[in-house]
């Protein structure tokens, strides 16, 4: 499901502020109203759904995740590149177009049975989101949905998510 | 300057924020007592209080730019920007920003690093604050200030959750005011 298919009137202004060639969300962040609308769209969707964890993927997921977490009363859990988190971590490797990468989460950040969202700015192939979901599920959380501002539909990232619901603000 | 010495003396929120921070000894190397703010982010009340204290301070200061230093500055800056109606400008490590950038090098203990900002993100005359989780030597924040000043912004203040010993007693960095919520936790008073 995507917000854009429902033609929410705020979508147009958000779309026009993203530099399409590079999918550069930094220009969205320069417009306070459009940035706030982006967050509000997610908050409206997830508030009151008993979600206690918002996990954000380094680094652009750190820009969108915390405001959502604060507004819905959830904790924010950063999912980071290797060797950035100081405490004991669990790691999940994933495949890139060329080579591999790895995502880490602190042990104990998430408790078994918690309901979680994963947030990133963009989904391409879905590899990073998949690794993020695996980390949360290994910690015993239930991933309720993956939420991104942008989807690149031609890369079919949704299909990598093993049937987990996915929400994008725009294509 | 520390918040407790500047209008927030005895504010119970500061104690909650301090207690929510975890100390990880010998990270990233022996002798360093790392101040881990990820535990603060797990405590919704303490995280919200952190953001609220900064928002209360900056909302009436006519700030139009909140610049956050990658990556932990990204965890605090956007929420502050949204609440005060300012834009959020990420200051990033090299080769992360896709558009045209200006770069500022700064000294590390061993070697140098570099911070970048998009050309045009900040307009001349804008009033800006810089946010990061922690200030130690001030090298990174100084580079951030220089980037914003090269963009012709006026840096009103630098704000950090935690301020290390080196900055205690200094309330300015590059001539710019520093606003800090808490001192580092010691391992003895933790857990």
Image (cartoon, helix red, strand yellow):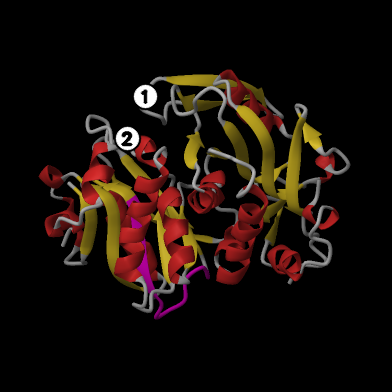
What is the number of the mark on residue A151?
Answer: none
Same chain for labels 2 and 1? Say yes or no. no
Provide the secondary structure element on which disc 1 rests.
loop
Asked if the stretch drawn in magenta spans residue A110, the answer is yes
Residue A125 higher or lower than A111, as above or below: above
How packed mark 1 is, by other alpha carbons closer than 10 Å (few <14, some 14-19, many 20 or more), is some
Asked if the stretch drawn in magenta spans residue A117, the answer is yes
How packed mark 2 is, by other alpha carbons closer than 10 Å (few <14, some 14-19, many 20 or more), is some
Residue B17 higher or lower than B116, as above or below: below
Could you tell me which chain the residue with mark 1 belongs to?
B
Give percent across and percent down for residue A65: 42, 56
Give percent across and percent down for residue B129: 62, 38
Give percent across and percent down for residue B171: 82, 39
Q: Dots 2 and 1: beta carbons under 8 Å?
A: yes
* B186 displayed left or right of A67: right
Q: In which quarter of the image is residue B177?
A: top right
Tell which residue pokes out farthest to the right in this image: B169
Provide the secondary structure element on which disc 2 rests.
loop
- Between residues B146 and B59, which one lies in front from this camera angle? B59
Residue at figure coordinates x 36%, y 35% from the top left: A27
Give percent across and percent down for residue A9: 21, 53
* A107 displayed left or right of B97: right
* B21 displayed left or right of B147: right
In magenta, the rendered stretch is: A108-120
- Between residues B28 and A151, which one lies in front from this camera angle? A151
Q: Is residue A91 visible in this depiction of the protein?
A: no
Residue at figure coordinates x 82%, y 52% from the top left: B6
Q: Is residue A120 visible in this depiction of the protein?
A: yes
Question: Circle 1 is placed at which residue position?
Answer: B99
Question: Circle 2 is placed at which residue position?
Answer: A24
Residue at figure coordinates x 68%, y 62% from the top left: B22
Residue at figure coordinates x 48%, y 51% from the top left: B82
């Amino acid at each position: 499901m995507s917000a854009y298919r429902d033609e929410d009137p705020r979508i147009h202004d958000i779309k026009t502020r993203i530099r399409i060639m590079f999918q550069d969300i930094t220009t969205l962040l320069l417009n306070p109203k459009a940035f706030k609308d982006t967050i509000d769209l997610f908050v409206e969707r997830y508030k009151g759904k008993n979600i206690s964890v918002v996990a954000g993927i380094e680094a652009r997921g750190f820009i969108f995740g915390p405001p959502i977490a604060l507004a819905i009363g959830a904790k924010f859990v950063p999912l980071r590149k290797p060797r950035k988190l100081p405490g004991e971590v669990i790691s999940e490797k994933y495949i890139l177009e060329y080579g591999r990468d790895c995502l880490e989460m602190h042990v104990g950040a998430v408790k078994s049975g918690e309901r979680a969202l994963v947030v990133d700015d963009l989904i391409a192939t879905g590899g990073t989101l998949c690794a993020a979901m695996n980390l949360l599920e290994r910690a015993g959380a239930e991933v309720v949905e993956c939420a991104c501002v942008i989807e690149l539909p031609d890369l079919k990232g949704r299909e990598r998510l093993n049937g987990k619901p996915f929400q994008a603000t725009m294509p | 300057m520390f918040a407790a010495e500047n209008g927030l003396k005895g504010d119970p929120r500061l104690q909650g924020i301090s207690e929510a921070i975890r100390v990880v000894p010998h990270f990233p190397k022996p002798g360093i007592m790392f101040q881990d703010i990820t535990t603060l982010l797990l405590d919704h009340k303490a995280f919200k209080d952190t953001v609220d204290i900064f928002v209360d301070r900056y909302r009436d200061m006519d700030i139009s730019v909140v610049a956050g230093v990658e990556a932990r500055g990204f965890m605090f800056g956007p929420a502050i920007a949204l609440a005060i109606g300012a834009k959020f400008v990420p200051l990033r490590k090299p080769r992360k920003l896709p558009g045209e950038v200006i770069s500022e090098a700064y000294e590390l203990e061993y070697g140098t690093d570099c911070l970048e900002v998009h050309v045009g993100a900040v307009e001349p005359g804008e009033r800006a604050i810089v946010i990061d989780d922690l200030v130690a030597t001030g090298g990174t924040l100084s580079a951030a200030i220089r980037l914003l000043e090269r963009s012709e912004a006026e840096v009103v203040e630098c704000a950090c959750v935690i301020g290390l010993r080196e900055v205690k007693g200094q309330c300015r960095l590059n001539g710019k005011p520093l606003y800090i919520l808490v001192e580092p936790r010691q391992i003895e008073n933790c857990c």
